[in-house]
Amino acid sequence: MFKKILTIFLYIFSTFSVYKNTTTVPNIKENKIIQTEEVEKVLMTLEIPSLRIKNKIYNIDSKENNIDKNVIIVKNSSMPDSKNGLIIIGAHSGIGKYAYFKDLDKLKIGDEIFITYNNKIYTYIINEIYLDDKDGNIIVNNDKNKKQLYLFTCNPKDKKNYLIISCIEK
């Protein structure tokens, strides 16, 4: 009988000890998934009606912000709602399923381009089209008094240069 009482006492005591020493640990895996979903969300939409282009642009740090499969936004870009924002967007030209900017050379000065960001549509007008050496850098004239959008791709007529489309907000 003493053994049974001792066994029950030890069982109750050990259960209480385990319960008392148990702490709630935040679910790090769940938190990481939420953070990853934020990074992978669509940041904005680019629409070029004259070329029938409408593409999603993902957050700058997203794995989807990859020129090998999407239209990309360059890390030095600011958002359209920033004072005098500067957005730089690029995509492949040429052929293939990811050649989103294959017809960028058909744009003309005065054409409109739309960016949808935070449920607001920003309208840009093309004001300059030029070529830049394909050396990994793109030269942009950042006019701090205007909101600007730059589109770039490989020049379809000459693979040694980038084709740059410069736009200002309407």
Image: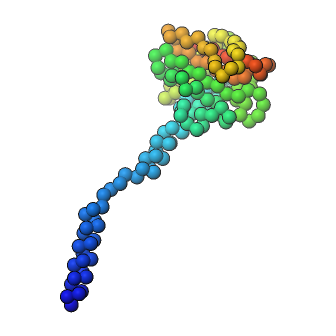
In the rendered image, the residue lying farthest to the right is: 157
In the image, taking residue 126 as reference, residue 147 lies left or right, namely left
In the image, taking residue 49 as reference, residue 121 lies left or right, namely left
Please tell me how many numbered marks the rendered image carries.
0
Q: Quadrant of residue 121?
A: top right
What residue is drawn where x is 63% and y is 34%? 66
Determine if residue 137 is in view. yes
Residue 141, percent from left and from top = 58, 11
Determine if residue 116 is in view. no
In the rendered image, the residue lying farthest to the bottom is: 1
Residue 165, percent from left and from top = 66, 16
In the rendered image, which quarter contains the C terminus?
top right
What residue is drawn where x is 46% and y is 46%? 32
Residue 110, percent from left and from top = 66, 11
Q: Quadrant of residue 53?
A: top right
In the rendered image, which quarter contains the N terminus?
bottom left
Quick one: 144 or 3, which is closer to the camera? 3
What residue is drawn where x is 24% and y is 77%? 10
Residue 59, percent from left and from top = 54, 33
Q: How is the image coloured?
A: rainbow
Quick one: 26 or 103, which is closer to the camera? 26
What residue is drawn where x is 56% and y is 21%? 87
